Image (cartoon, rainbow, N blue to C red):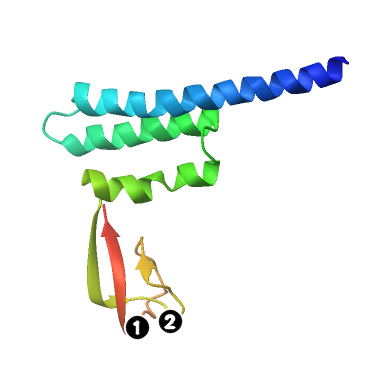
Amino acid sequence: MTIVNNAEENRQTGRLKRTIGLLAGPTAALVILFLLDLEPDNPLVTRTAAVAALMAIWWTTEAIPIPATALLPVALFPLLGIMICIQMKYSMSPPKMGKISYLMYADNGKSQLRKQNHLVCVI
């Protein structure tokens, strides 16, 4: 009897934690974004802190699945102007690389110029 009650209690606690996280994450991000100015000369610092707060709250409360939380910067950085994405006709990339290049890489000096369309995101 107590095992069933404990399982139900744990489910309800987890549901409450996720609900609080779903509300607290965006609220904290909006408060940071609109009410704080962490570095007056550079608004990107405040925008990045807002995304970090949202991610930290959602990560710890598991409001959404952790892999989805990890993808938040990919979606929010370009929207907030933290990261600029441009399309390049020629890019230095290994032969098997897909269409999206996020970071520069080292290929022991053996990189070749490929004629491919790549989306390059620069922070």
Q: Is residue 24 above or below residue 108?
A: above
- The x, y position of residue 32, in whole percent, is 27, 25
Front position in the image: 79 or 83: 79
Q: Is residue 91 above or below residue 50?
A: below
Residue positioned 32% across, 45% down in the render: 76
Assign a secondary structure to mark 1. loop
Left or right of 98? Residue 78 is left
In the rendered view, does 13 fall on the left or right side of 85? Answer: right
**Horizontal and vertical percent position of residue 92:** 32, 76
Contact between marks 1 and 2 (CB within 8 A): the answer is yes
What amino acid is at disc 2? Answer: Pro
Q: Nearer the viewer, mark 1 or mark 2?
A: 2
Q: Amino acid at mark 1?
A: Gln
Q: Secondary structure at mark 2?
A: loop
Residue marked by disc 2: 95
* Residue matched to label 1: 112
**Mark toward the start of the polypeptide (1 vs 2):** 2
